[in-house]
Image (tube, grey):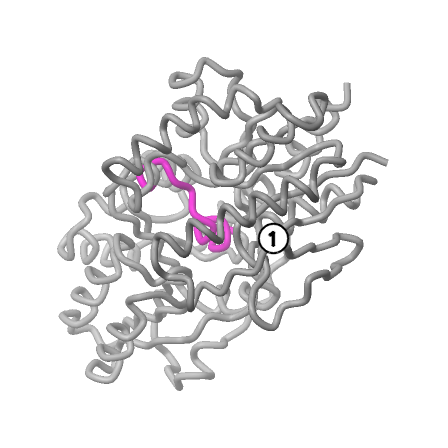
Amino acid sequence: MVKIASLVFNPFINDSRVLKEGLSLVKEGYSVEIVAHGDKELPSKDENNGLVVRRLAYLDRTITKGKVGKLKAYLQFIKESVAYCKDFDILHCNDINMLPIGVIIKKFYKKDIKIVYDAHEYETETYALSGIQKKATKLAEKFLIKYADKVITVSDSIANEYVKLYGIEKPALVLNAPSYKDVVKYDKFREAFNMEGKTIFLYQGGLGKNRGIEFLLEVFKTINNSESIMVFMGYGELESLIVENAKEHDNIFFHKAVSPDVLLEYTVSADFGIATIEDSCLSYRYCLPNKLFEYIMAEVPMIVSNLPEMSKVVKKNNIGVVVENETPEGIKKAIEKALLLDKKQINKNLKNVKKIYNWEEQEKVLLKLYKELEA
């Protein structure tokens, strides 16, 4: 049986992409272990439907905040992962920070080991990277990627950029889509907040900067139409700002994040889904965020930023509105336009599109890639 180690530099609590990939490979007959770092109150070994989770070097992110502390924890994780993973057949390296582990093992321990590099975003062009750190990451990826036998990424634009940058075969495209589900209508938000008869706009996911959240708050603070409600569901650094605004404005609400297994029950409870991303780095510009596909699976019309990949999905399939310019005024116009949509036609389009953008279709790409590795 082919042994796969899927490496992540997180405690593997809610990494839905890595979980879906792992379970798909287990179902196909592979032996798969997720190799993650330890964290407080988490077992060193866990199992989920045949998928083994192995947690190595301990890292408590609430304590390890300084750069030196994080670097020490990362180097310890590399050391322990190299020792543990050198007898596997395939190393699935999630994100650029896991690629060195695969390369070290391939160069010094097992030359015939296969490496899959799974770039979950445009790794060298993220908002968090700048200056020397960005240059170092670019140099590292340029050197390390040549050792990868297969590369996977999350949007066509990012795949094309990797081809131009490194002259490699075009990476396989595995989108962050949820598993296919038929819609069962719920009314979670109206039940929770007593908003009968209101039109609900939902933003779900990370509540961080550069997601248009501050703009959305400005818009709904000024909207006079009391029938339009904005619900933010998730967690992140802007959570307290949202809670403060929710206390002052009766058309803004905050709902804490929910587990992935019940997420779509909440998503279908909205009338419109919002996926705004500010064009602050190339990784954001070329992104296709999870929430986009979650809205599609829930058959919820959406309002998205005017970024190449996101707007292409929405315009091509006529499933919502694209914000023409990322300002409060631009978002307000998009909301007004969304309220005038032919929802019957949009719903019909969503039912067709979800047959394409689901994990069962993405799984086919992943399994084909793994079969090619064995050839």
The residue labelled by disc 1 is: 36
**Quadrant of the image containing the N terminus:** top right
Q: How many marks?
A: 1
Q: For the point 60% across and 25% down, which residue is it?
A: 150
Q: Is residue 23 above or below residue 256?
A: above
Decide whether the magenta segment is chiefly helix, strand or loop.
helix
Q: For the point 21% across and 69% down, which residue is it?
A: 220
Instruction: Inspect this view and state whether residue 244 appears.
Output: yes
| Residue 104, horizontal then vertical, whole percent | 59, 30
- Residue nearest the observer in this picture, 269 or 30: 30
**Quadrant of the image containing the C terminus:** top right
- Residue nearest the observer in this picture, 1 or 242: 1
* Kind of residue at badge 1: Ala
- Residue nearest the observer in this picture, 375 or 202: 375
Q: Residue furthest top?
A: 167
Q: Is residue 292 above or below residue 266?
A: above
Q: How busy is the neighbourhood of tag 1: few (under 14 within 10 Å), some, or many (20 plus)?
A: many
| Residue 253, horizontal then vertical, whole percent | 32, 77
- Residue nearest the observer in this picture, 9 or 156: 9
| Residue 250, horizontal then vertical, whole percent | 25, 82
The answer to whether 303 appears left or right of 323 in the picture is right
Q: For the point 40% across and 64% down, which residue is it?
A: 271
| Residue 16, horizontal then vertical, whole percent | 58, 54
Is residue 1 on the magenta stretch? no
Local secondary structure at mark 1:
strand
The answer to whether 267 appears left or right of 52 in the picture is left
Residue 57, image quadrant: bottom right
**Magenta segment, which residues?**
284-296
Residue 352, image quadrant: top right
